[in-house]
Image (cartoon, rainbow, N blue to C red):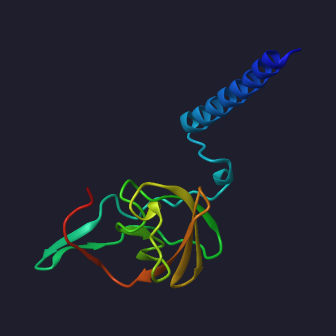
């Protein structure tokens, strides 16, 4: 086989690999299974209320959490919602605040939808791990949360 034949063979192998990857990702998205590391995790418990309880204040809208308690040390499958981890993150019966090290840029999942794992590591601390390998420490917000405006 000449140089052209070797190049065609390589291109054929690359094309087959690309097609297999695309089909695999398409299947996972369609089946709702998500990335492989998310399979087998505990699902988030159903909320204790259907809607958030809220009240208008001079500072904005005050919201009370609606989430059910979580078990410390258990890894849960968690979706940040379309506004990301910074917007009204509600789990374990409280709102939570994500943190990044000073001077570091917040990861994309702070403001964009993401799927990952959530583990409560102490009564007031939790870890979110993104499917892309990033992570963030969260601390419990005591009481209701006052929000100005809405997530776009």
Q: Is residue 136 above or below residue 33?
A: below
Q: Residue 103: image x %, image y %?
A: 45, 80
Q: How many marks?
A: 0
Residue name at image x 45 percent, y 70 percent: 106
Of residues 144 and 135, the one drawn nearer to the viewer in this rendering: 135
Could you tell whether 91 is left or right of 72 in the image? left
- Residue appearing at x 42%, y 62% in the figure: 47
* Residue at 72% in and 23% down: 11
Residue at the far left: name it. Answer: 58
Q: In this picture, is 18 found above or below 90? A: above
Against 152, is 145 above or below?
Answer: below
**Which quadrant: the N terminus?**
top right
Q: Where in the figure is residue 125, as x and y percent of width and height?
A: 53, 82
Residue 23: image x %, image y %? 63, 29
The residue at the point 45 percent across, 60 percent down is 108
In the picture, measured across the screen, residue 53 lies left or right of residue 141, that is: left
Residue 43 left/right relative to 17: left
Out of 80 and 76, give the one closest to the viewer: 80
Q: Residue 143 sits in which quadrant?
A: bottom left
Taking the view exactly as shown, the residue that stands out farthest to the right is: 1
Image-quadrant location for residue 8: top right
Residue at the outermost front position? 3
**The C terminus sits in image quarter:** bottom left
């Amino acid at each position: 086989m000449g140089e052209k034949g070797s190049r065609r063979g390589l291109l054929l192998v690359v094309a087959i690999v690309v097609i297999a990857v695309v089909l695999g990702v398409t299947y996972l998205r369609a089946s709702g299974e998500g990335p492989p590391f998310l399979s087998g995790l505990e699902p988030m418990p159903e909320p204790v209320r259907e809607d958030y309880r809220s009240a208008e204040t001079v500072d904005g809208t005050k919201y009370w959490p609606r989430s059910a308690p979580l078990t410390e040390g258990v890894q849960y499958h968690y979706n940040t919602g379309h506004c990301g981890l910074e917007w009204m993150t509600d789990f374990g019966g409280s709102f939570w605040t994500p943190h990044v090290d000073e001077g570091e840029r917040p990861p994309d999942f702070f403001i964009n939808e993401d799927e990952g794992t959530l583990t409560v590591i102490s009564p007031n601390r939790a870890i979110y791990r993104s499917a892309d390998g990033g992570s963030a420490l969260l601390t419990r917000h005591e009481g209701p949360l006052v929000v100005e405006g809405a997530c776009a």
